[in-house]
Amino acid sequence: MIHKIGIVGYGGMGSYHCSGIREKLSDCLEVKGVYDVREERQQAALDDGLIAYGNLESLLNDPEIEFVTIATPNNFHKPIAIEALRHGKNVICEKPVTMGSAELKEILAVAEETGKLFTVHQNRRWDRDYRIVKEIADSGIIGKPYMIESRVQGSKRVLQEWRGRKENGGGMVYDWGIHILDQVMWMDKSPVREVYCDLFSIFTKEVDDNFKAVIKFESGLNVLLQVDTNCFINEPRWHVLCEDGTAVIYDWSCSGKIVKLKDDKDLGWDSVIVYTEAGPTRTMAPRPRETTEELPLPDVRPDWSDFYKNVIAAAEGREELIVKPAEVLRVMNVIDKLFESGATGKSVSVGV
Ligand SMILES: NC(=O)c1ccc[n+]([C@@H]2O[C@H](COP(=O)([O-])OP(=O)(O)OC[C@H]3O[C@@H](n4cnc5c(N)ncnc54)[C@H](O)[C@@H]3O)[C@@H](O)[C@H]2O)c1
């Protein structure tokens, strides 16, 4: 069966959903039409062969539409999601689902009451770099991870349009932070014990345009999350310290490596001081290359379209949702605490 979907907000992401669905999901999903407040985006929808509904109400009143994807700026997610659920639609909301956990709880109450499906487009759970790290952690090939650094760094500085405005839910915690937090919280399901966050507003005064956060899990895993918009020399996208080795993924190309001690070598504590260009050291003396071995990164090939396939299967009662409302709420609770920590300059207990 081919299900029909409507998209609210036909900007960058709304049109991405449409082209992705057309390219990869035409056997199960068809975009029937969109509603966007801007005339030029309504015209873009018509040019793309879609219906441009005159208002939100008429899209939601179309009985053929079973699913609605919301891709507006963040402050509109809550009212549109509630309206769509009340019209009997299954709802897929863009991230960040809301501006804070209180708003999200209001949506989830309506989803519960109407019995309709509600999920969030946490598409970066299907990113290849992330799945490589998850595979390293899940398989235990170099033991248990205890410190993960996940960084996204660019140099375009000022956040454009609504992304730079507080009332729209702008800023980098809501933009990228939510993705990289969701990634690590989907990997380690133990409660987050404590967080600390530094928020910077260097070029975009109303919102955080850079941030650095530490997330401590009950499992013992510590995570550093960092998003920069004024960085011209990037650190690796992922740096993963595990008990038996280290993994690195350098950048968007997903290139990287795993390095561990060779099985037949010992750690080789030096009793003598080594003199390096920088100065003397014993504990940190560079290791001879022949004592380590390099392993390739696991070859994983996730596919974004599995997100929508799962949403449809869940609506048909064939599968459990992958992006579960309870997980999204858990992440949003931690996001609230990041802002609290950023505002107070103190670490904050979490316990979710
Ligand atoms: N999952 C991801 O990787 C990802 C990537 C980019 C953006 N997003 C999210 O998608 C959403 C949209 O971001 P974008 O980059 O497409 O922004 P955008 O500015 O390109 O598009 C937003 C569109 O929504 C329309 N709009 C605004 N208010 C509306 C309303 N009340 N009703 C209907 N239409 C309305 C605007 O006219 C605009 O065309 C945001 O929540 C953003 O965080 C997610």
Image: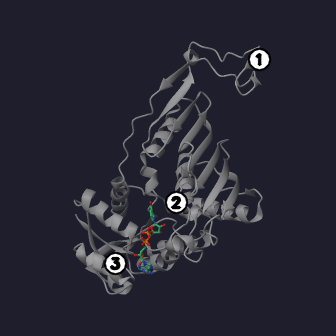
Q: Residue 51 in the image: x percent, y percent? A: 25, 79
- Answer yes or no: disc 2 within 8 Å of ligand 1: no
Q: Residue 201 in the image: x percent, y percent? A: 65, 65
Which residue corresponds to mark 3? 41
Name, please, the residue furthest toward the front: 277
Which residue corresponds to mark 2? 156
Q: State the residue in front, 199 or 60.
A: 199
Is 347 placed above or below 29 here? above
Q: State the residue in front, 202 or 337.
A: 202
Q: Can residue 74 be seen in this snapshot? A: no
Is 337 placed above or below 294 here? below
Q: State the residue in front, 46 or 263.
A: 46
- Nearer the observer, disc 2 or disc 1? 2
Q: Residue 137 in the image: x percent, y percent? A: 53, 37
Quadrant of the rendering where the C terminus is positioned:
bottom right
Give the alpha-carbon distance from disc 1 to disc 3, as whole Å: 67 Å
**For the residue labelled by badge 2, is the local secondary structure a helix, a strand or a loop?**
loop
Q: Residue type at mark 1?
A: Ile
Which residue corresponds to mark 1? 273
Is 94 placed above or below 347 here? below
Considering only order in the chain, which callout, 3 or 1, is on the residue closer to the N terminus?
3
**For the residue labelled by badge 3, is the local secondary structure a helix, a strand or a loop?**
helix
Give the alpha-carbon distance from disc 2 to disc 1, as whole Å: 45 Å
- Nearer the observer, disc 2 or disc 3? 2
Considering only order in the chain, which callout, 3 or 2, is on the residue closer to the N terminus?
3
Q: Residue type at mark 2?
A: Lys
Residue drawn at (57%, 39%), measured in percent from left and top? 239
Lateral position of residue 151 relative to residue 54, left or right: right
